[in-house]
Amino acid sequence: MKLLRVGPSGAERPALLDQGGTLRDLSALVDDIDGGLLADASALDRIRAAAGAGVLPALDATGLRIGPPVGRIGKVVCIGLNYHGHAAETGQATPAEPVVFLKAADTVVGPDDTVLVPRGSVKTDWEVELAIVIGRTARYLETDEEALAHVAGYAVAHDVSEREYQIERGGTWDKGKNCETFNPLGPWLVTADEVPDPQGLGLRLWVNGELKQDGHTSDQIFPVAEVVRYVSRFMTLYPGDVINTGTPAGVAMGQPEPKPYLRPGDVVELEVEGLGRQRQELKGA
């Protein structure tokens, strides 16, 4: 299933995109697409049954904003340097273990919402990523099979990053990762049953129509199952939590000088195979 949330920011309602591309209202069945729903197999089965029966009312998508596909996210866990190509382009060694950092949940916005370039920023960068959405509480998982069984689904994420803040201002990466609007997510949550191999997905990103990233999840250093298993040994993952799994080569930081960092007025478009497409116009904060 392709689950999503539509409407004004803070007042989104649950919806489903059916196989014919029609947007369907889920408001009569569930209150929201959130961790509570994703952990409730019977509620998900009711949605599947209603979709199969063709009884869900259609929504007019004209002018309708798409919000983040998951509401009330508890935390966003991110994996850095998780593609061989990206590590190479930035001149960094392949990590022996996953590089883990956090983004605040309030960085998450809709897939087509405006992204704000921080005041004074000269090194705002792009990163297309595969996002994992957790569906079952995960602690100390032992096997890859266990890890994948705890995944509710997948989505497109844009891990927007300010490289000066991240690398040159001391401390951890968090300062360059948590600026307002720095995690567009969606358009949909595609349930895990529709993504049989998360290591078989292409990722692409364009800036002002020019292709910048053209990667594949097969290039991940730590695959999806290993990421979930690993993270569960350091923190408890709850339904509705999100894990951004890293970006392929092609970021601005990896380009020759002058590096083409983002500026207000730029347009970024990105997609992950089978998971939909995003488009953001950048403005000054």
Image: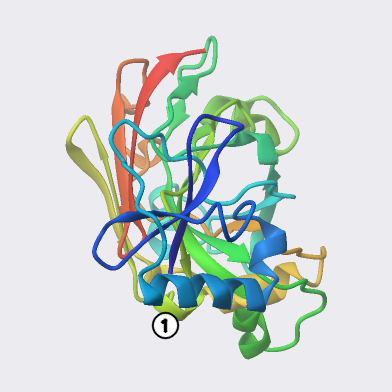
Three-letter code, disc 1: Pro
Tag 1 residue: 196
Nearest the viewer among 242 and 126 is 242
Picture coordinates of residue 138, whole percent (x, y): 77, 73
Image quarter hosting the N terminus? bottom left
Q: Residue at x 31, y 52 (%)?
A: 271
Locate residue 114: give its quadrant. Answer: top left
- Inspect this view and state whether residue 240 appears: no
Horizontal side of residue 276 vs 190, given as left or right: left
Horizontal side of residue 79 vs 65, given as left or right: right
Locate residue 62: give its quadrant. Answer: top left
- Inspect this view and state whether residue 239 appears: yes
Above or below for 63 versus 60: above
Above or below for 106 versus 31: above
Nearest the viewer among 203 and 64 is 64
Q: How did the renderer colour the structure?
A: rainbow
